Image: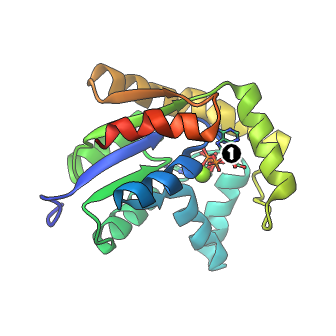
Amino acid sequence: MSGLDDKFIVFIMGGPGCGKGTQCAILREEFNLAHLSSGDLLRAEVAKGTPEGLEIKSFMDEGKLVPQETVINLMKKAIMEVPNRGILLDGFPRSVSQLEEFERTVKPAKCALYFSCTEEEMLKRIMHRASHAAVKRSDDNPETAMKRFRTYTTEAQPAIQRLREMGKLIEVDAMRPIQDVTDDARKAFI
Ligand code: AP5
Ligand code: MG
């Protein structure tokens, strides 16, 4: 994709509720980065109430991956609109196919930050958010969370493994307090 020569992309990976969005919000401020979350971009499409939005919602409520073409097109459009040099892609890629298609048609990532966390802890964080957030997400319930975990294992884990083999993966133990996780994550930018 043209116009990206002086920009760099960092993939932000990890299971549902591991803390991707939380860490991106901190890193964005500290390093003047753009933060593009595939989940947030999809929720914005759902909020439009269009037939396409309703279809997207049906995938999200089942904890399944939204079709790749939809997600990559939303990502490409958002990438072209942000002025920042560094761009965090939160929750993307989520499969080997997304990884390959993005790196082929947009730009290879500089690196990927992977926040590792157990399912037990991720479920706790999701349920805590569900009971405290002002706006509750329709996929933040135990049943959909378990489906999201399954999709993560079958689809996203192979992409994480591929990035490890490519020498691009920076693994951070996300089982610790937010500040400690950030202390490790910021090493990707300095
Ligand atoms: P998405 O919105 O990306 O959801 P997710 O990956 O399931 O992750 P979350 O946003 O729930 O969690 P997070 O890791 O951002 O954690 P957070 O910082 O909020 O995707 C939703 C759906 O969209 C997918 O299921 C799929 O259907 C679709 N989709 C998205 N991307 C797609 C793609 N690329 N392709 C196809 N489909 C796609 O933290 C969670 C909670 O924990 C918060 O309350 C937070 O305060 C707390 N917390 C954070 N860090 C800590 C810590 N260190 N200690 C204690 N609490 C913490
Ligand atoms: Mg998130």
Q: How many marks?
A: 1
Answer with left or right where residue 6 lies relative to residue 173: left
Q: Residue 121's image quarter? A: top right
Residue beneath disc 1: 63
Picture quarter with the N terminus: bottom left
Picture quarter with the C terminus: top left
The answer to whether residue 95 shows anywhere in this view is: no
Residue at the top extreme of this rendering: 165
| Residue 3, horizontal then vertical, whole percent | 15, 67
Above or below — where is 127 with respect to 31? above
- Ligand 1 within 8 Å of disc 1? The answer is yes
Above or below — where is 21 with respect to 114? below
| Residue 52, horizontal then vertical, whole percent | 58, 71
Answer with left or right where residue 179 lies relative to residue 113: right
Q: Residue 20's image quarter? A: top right
The answer to whether residue 140 shows anywhere in this view is: yes
| Residue 167, horizontal then vertical, whole percent | 27, 23
Residue at the right extreme of this rendering: 131
Q: Amino acid at mark 1?
A: Gly
Measuring 52% from the left and 65% from the top, which residue is drawn there? 41
Measuring 52% from the left and 33% from the top, which residue is drawn there? 115
Q: Name the residue nearer the viewer: 53 or 122.
A: 122
| Residue 33, horizontal then vertical, whole percent | 36, 59
Measuring 67% from the left and 33% from the top, which residue is drawn there? 149
Q: Name the residue nearer the viewer: 53 or 115.
A: 115
